[in-house]
Image (cartoon, grey):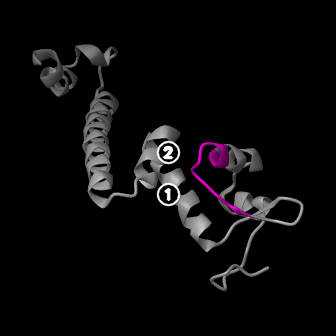
């Protein structure tokens, strides 16, 4: 089946399989108004290439720690300036979380490099945590 833009239409099973998702996830995202597949005979869902990009956006945003409500807000706002405001807030939050993850990674690397029986007593490890203690 071809979509109105000439692209191939996919079933819910095909699009779910492409991303390694159970079909109930796509149905849930539809209920959350994140996806709006076309409906054809017997009310069967049909997805086109644009839906592939929407699913990829949802998955990437979830990987970044955003809730489905956050994702819906980011992708559903029609006003470009309002959308940029939402994206700026999400950008700031993600930047903060990346910095926290880098700091945690550095702490783990310090602990891995330590030869002490109790790495928490290691001077090098303690220096890696000094900013947290002094804050």
Q: In which quarter of the image is residue 89?
A: top left
Query: Helix, strand, or loop for circle 2?
Result: helix
Examine the rendered structure and indicate whether residue 44 appears above or below residue 107: below
Residue 60 position within the rendered picture, expressed as x and y whole percent measured from the top left? 48, 53
Q: Which mark, residue 67?
A: none
- Outermost residue to the left: 134
Dominant secondary-structure state across the stretch colored magenta? loop
Quadrant containing the N terminus in the rendered view: bottom right
Q: Residue 24 location in percent, x, y? A: 75, 45
- Name the residue carrying label 1: 57
**Residue at x 52%, y 52% (from the top left corner):** 58
Q: Residues within 10 Å of mark 1 (few under 14, many from 20)?
A: some
Q: Mark 2 or mark 1, which is nearer the start of the sequence?
A: 1
103 vs 133: above or below: below
| Element under disc 1 | helix
Residue drawn at (41%, 50%) of the image? 74
Q: Which residue lies furthest to the bottom in this view?
A: 6
Is 95 displayed left or right of 10 in the figure?
left
Judge from the rendering whether residue 47 lies leftward or rightward of residue 73; answer left or right. right
The residue sitting at 76% across, 59% down in the picture is 12
Residue that carries the numbered disc 2 in the rendered image: 62
Expressed as whole percent of the image width and height from the top left, the position of residue 43 reads 84, 58
Number of residues whose C-alpha sits closer than 10 Å to that of mark 2, classed few (under 14), some (14–19) or many (20 or more): some
Residue 101: quadrant of the picture:
top left
Q: What stretch is highlighted in magenta?
A: 29-38
Quadrant holding the C terminus: top left
């Amino acid at each position: 089946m071809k979509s109105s833009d000439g692209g191939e239409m996919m079933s819910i099973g095909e699009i779910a399989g492409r991303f390694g998702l159970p079909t109930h996830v796509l149905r849930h995202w539809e209920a959350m108004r994140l996806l709006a597949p076309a409906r054809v005979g017997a009310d069967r869902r049909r997805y086109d290439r644009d839906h592939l990009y929407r699913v990829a956006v949802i998955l990437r945003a979830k990987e970044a720690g955003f809730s489905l409500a956050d994702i819906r807000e980011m992708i559903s706002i029609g006003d470009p300036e309002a959308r940029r405001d939402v994206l700026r807030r999400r950008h700031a939050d993600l930047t903060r979380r990346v910095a926290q993850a880098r700091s945690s990674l550095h702490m783990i690397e310090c602990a891995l490099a330590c030869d002490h029986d109790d790495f928490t007593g290691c001077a090098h490890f303690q220096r890696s945590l000094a900013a947290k203690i002094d804050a």
